Image (cartoon, helix red, strand yellow):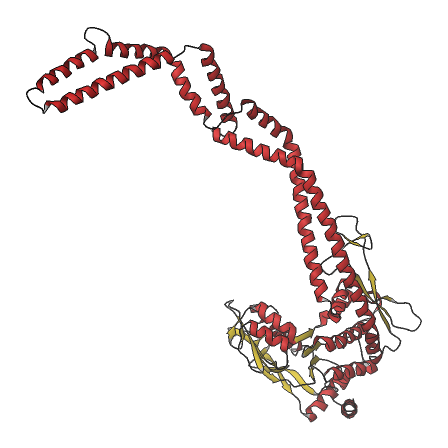
Amino acid sequence: MLVKLLVKDYALIELAEVEFRPGLNIITGETGAGKSILIGALGLLIGDRANADVIRKGAKKAIVEGEFTVSGLTALTKILDEFEIEYEDEIIIRREISLKGANRVFLNDTPVSLAQVKRLGNMLVDMHGQHEHQSLLQVDKHIDFLDRLGNYENPLSDFRRKTSLLEDKKRELKKLKQREKELKEKEELYRFQLNEIETVSPEENEDEELSAQLRILENSEHILRSANEIYSFIYEGEESIYDRVSMLKKMFSDLTRFDKEFIAQEDEIQSVLTSLAEAASFVLDYGNGIELDEEALEAKRERLGAINLLKRKYGGSLAAVLELRDKLERELNLAVNFTKEISALENEIENLRVEAGLIAERISAARKRTAETVSPKIENELHKLGMEEAIFDVKFEREESTGDDFIYLEKKKVKYNEKGADIVEFMISTNKGEDLKSLAKIASGGEISRVMLALKTILAEKDAIPLLIFDEIDVGISGRIAQKVAETMRGLGKTHQVIAISHLPQIAAFGNHHFVIEKEETKERVISKIRPLNKTERIRELAKLISGEKIVPAAIEHANELIKLSETV
C-alpha cells in the first residue's frame, strides 16, 4: 500500500506531504483546488509520462515521491530481485521532472527506466480515472475486462506464438509468390540469355587461350620464316655459328695441353654448342609443326568474337558470363520447383490455421466459463449498488472472414487478432422485464459508474493489487445510490487500500480517513495544499459538501448522521 506521498513544485502544489492509511482514504475539495493534480502526481509514480509543463512556475524541477509497503507481495518482490534493487519491507519510487529535460526515475535511490517503474506500478496500483468510464462504452475493451477476470494466459500465449508463426509463413508465401510472378515475367528473358550463353558454351579462361593461339596463327608466316633463318644461321653456310663455335672449342682444347685451367673454359664452350643445337632443334620442330590453315584461323577468330560479344553483353569478363550462366540455371530450376515449394508452404499455413483455431476454441471455452462465473457476481454487486433488477451477461460472437486474415473454427474461416477469435460484449438489462441490450448503448452515466465499480470489486478479489485509486467514480449518481456506492467502497477498503476523490457527502462520510485539498493565496500566487481532517474538521467538510460554503445547522446534523451510518457498515 501507499504509506507516504510527497509532491514538490508540481503544478499548483508547492509542497505537499501526506501519509495514507489502510482502508478507504477519501479526498475532497472544491472544484479547481487541485484534486486532479494530485491524481496526476500519483500517476507519475506508476509510470505515466510527464513533461516540463507540470513544473511549478519559478521552480527548476518537480518531484513526486511515494513510499510503498511490499511485504507479502511475492510477484512484486520477484521483479525487484530481477531489477537487482535492494529492499526490505518498503520501496520508494521517486520521479524528477526537470526544466532541462533531464527527467529521472529512482527506485530506492537506484536510477531505473520508466518502463521498469510502469511494470512495478501495474502490480502496485489500479488507478481508475474519470476517462476510464468511457472504456465500458467501447465494446472492443470488454474482452480486456473479461480476460483480467479469467485465468487462461498460457493458452493466450500459445495462441500468440502460433498466430505469429502463421503471420510469418503468410509473409513468406507472399514473398515466394511474388518471386514466382517476377520470375515468370523474366523467364523468357532468362531462357533467351541462357540459350545464348550455352550456344557458345565458353569454358573458363578460354578467351585467354584463344587469344594466345590467334597470336601464333596470325603470325605463322613470320614465325616460320624466322625459324628457318635461325636454323640456317646456326648450321648452314661456311661461317655458321655452330662451326665457328666448334672451331673455338678446338682452340681451347689445344691450350689444355699446356694448362689444365683451360679445361673449364672448354666445357663452357661445349655448353654453348649444346644450347645452339637445342635451339636449332626447337625452331626446326616448331616450324615443322606450323600449318598455314586459313579455315582454322578463321574459326578461332569467330569463336573469340562470339565469346567477346558475350563478355560485352553480360558483365565485361568471361568469369562474369559464367557466373551469370550458373545464376540463370538456378533461377530457372527454381521456377520448376516453385509449385512444389508453394504447395508445401500453403499446407503448412493451413495446418497452422487449424492448430490456432483449436487453441482459440480452448480460450473461448475458458472465457465462457469465466463469464458464467463472474456474471452472477457482477449482478450481485449491481444489486448492492441499487440496481436491484439488473441482469448482466456476456455475449460472444465471431466474425467470418472473406480475406486472408482467418483461422479455422468449427470448419469456418474466422477472423482473429492477438486475443483470439472472440468478439466479447457486455449486455445488461437494468429494469425488470427488459431484454438484454448492449451496455455501451443503453447505460446512463450513473449506471456505467456502478458497472465499473462492480467490475473493479470483482477484479480486486483476483488481482491482489494492494492500492485502488478512484477519481470521481461517483459521477452521475446521488442520494440513496451514492450511499450504496460508499458501502461497496468501504467494503473494498477492508481488503485493499483505497484512495477515492469524491464530491458527494454520502461517499465522503464512509471514508476511514478523510483528506481535503484546499487552495491558498500567498504572495499573489495560488497554491494547493492537502491535509488530513480530524473529526470536527471532517464534520464541517461534510456539511460544506451538503449545504455549500455557508454551513447551516441542518447540514452539521446531516453530516453527523452520515458518519454514524458509516460506522454501522
Dividing the picture into quarters, in which one does residue 162 lie? bottom right
Percent x, y of residue 280: 28, 14
* Farthest residue, direction right: 433
Q: Tell me the quarter of the image containing the C terminus.
A: bottom right
* Farthest residue, direction top: 238
User: Who's the residue at 47% across and 11% down the image?
Assistant: 295
* Farthest residue, direction left: 258
User: Who's the residue at 69% across and 46% down the image?
Assistant: 345
The answer, for residue 366, to whether it is visible in the render is yes
Count of all numbered marks drawn on residues in the image: 0
Between 261 and 569, the one lying in front of the other is 261
The answer, for residue 7, to whether it is visible in the render is no
Dividing the picture into quarters, in which one does residue 196 lie? top right
Q: Is residue 431 above or below residue 249?
A: below
28 on left or right of 485: left
Q: Is residue 462 above or below residue 207?
A: below
Percent x, y of residue 76: 62, 75
Q: Tell me the quarter of the image containing the N terminus.
A: bottom right
User: Who's the residue at 55% across and 79% down the image?
Assistant: 87
Percent x, y of residue 379: 84, 75
Percent x, y of residue 567: 76, 91
Q: Is residue 265 above or below residue 494?
A: above
Dividing the picture into quarters, in which one does residue 386 lie? bottom right
